Structures are given as C-alpha cells and as structure tokens.
Amino acid sequence: MDGSIRVHLGYHWDGFTSLALYLGNSEFDTDGRITNAVNSAFNTITLIGGNGALQEDGNFKDPFVADAAVNSSSDAMLIAGLAACGTELPDESPLSALLSFQVLHGTDAGSFNWTPEMTYDRQLSTQQAVYALDQYSYSVDGKGSIFDFTANPVN
C-alpha cells in the first residue's frame, strides 16, 4: 500500500485521496482504521520527492506518474483534505504554490488558472481553490470542516 487511495480509471489519485481525508475527523472511526488510513495518506502526501507528492516548490503531483503535471486543482484538493482532518501543512509552501495560480489582473482577477499555461475555463479551479482556502482558514481557527453545517450554520 502506497498511502494513497488509487483508482485505476485515470490519474485522479489526488482527488480521491483528498476526499478520503475529509473522513479523517469522522465520528464513525470506532476501530481506528480511518485514522490509520489518514496517517498513511498524510505521510505519502507530505513526503518530499521520491514516492512523496509534495514537491520542493510546494506544489503536489502524483508521485506514481512520471509525467504528471502540477495544477491548482490538485494543490487545492490536497490542502483542503489535509486541513479537514486537522493535520498541519508541513509549511506555508503549499498555500504559496496554490496562490501562484491566481490571476492578478484583468477581468478575471481573483480567479485561478488550472496550470500556468491553461488560462481559460477557470471556474472549477477557482471553486476548488476557494474551498481549500476556506477549509484551511476554518482549520486554523479550530472550526472543523466547512461541510459541517451544524457546527458552522449558514446565516
């Protein structure tokens, strides 16, 4: 087991792994299996280089695909997943890497590119970045998950 949740339908290891991390603070973890899976995923995700997903520049990329590209959606999903289960980022570099995809000028200022080269169709990348930044902020403030509407009611 490599620590990630792998689905042999494509390259979306990061999305499935990060979504599984949302279970890390689950009240249903009666036997510790979810905690063990989260710890294993965290160790793989935050290991720099080699079999780890975290790159020197703070971006995440699939360590099991040689030509995998870094992108804002992978960064956002993994930041959100790690934050949701209450784990601290190894440093601020993943946040800086995510913010490096943000458009700073023009009519799309504030939105996020998927990659530096792909500067169109920014809706999904922006949505995922906002979720990640909100989840990180909630975690830092001790509020738990952005999806816990009983603890964090929408007014």
Image: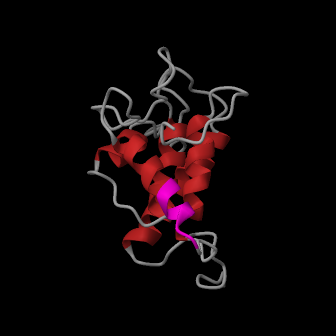
Looking at the image, which residue sits at the far top?
67
Q: Is residue 153 left or right of residue 101?
A: right
Is 153 above or below relative to 10?
Answer: below
Q: Where does residue 154 sit, x and y in percent of width and height?
A: 66, 81
Q: Quadrant of the C terminus?
A: bottom right
Task: Please state which of residues 107 and 10 is positioned toward the viewer in this rendering.
Answer: 10
Is 17 above or below relative to 68?
Answer: below
- Residue drawn at (67%, 32%), measured in percent from left and top? 121
Q: Quadrant of residue 31?
A: bottom right
Determine if the magenta segment contains residue 33. yes
Is 95 above or below relative to 13?
Answer: below
- Residue drawn at (51%, 27%), measured in percent from left and top? 115
Q: Quadrant of residue 33?
A: bottom right
Is any part of residue 86 visible from this angle? yes
Q: Where does residue 39 sit, x and y in percent of width and height?
A: 43, 55
Q: Quadrant of residue 105?
A: top left
Q: Which residues are magenta?
A: 31-37
Q: Where does residue 144 sit, x and y in percent of width and height?
A: 50, 74
- Residue drawn at (57%, 46%), measured in percent from left and top? 17
Task: Please state which of residues 44 and 104 is positioned toward the viewer in this rendering.
Answer: 44
Determine if the magenta segment contains residue 18. no
Task: Please state which of residues 64 and 1 is positioned toward the viewer in this rendering.
Answer: 1
Q: Is residue 134 left or right of residue 6?
A: left
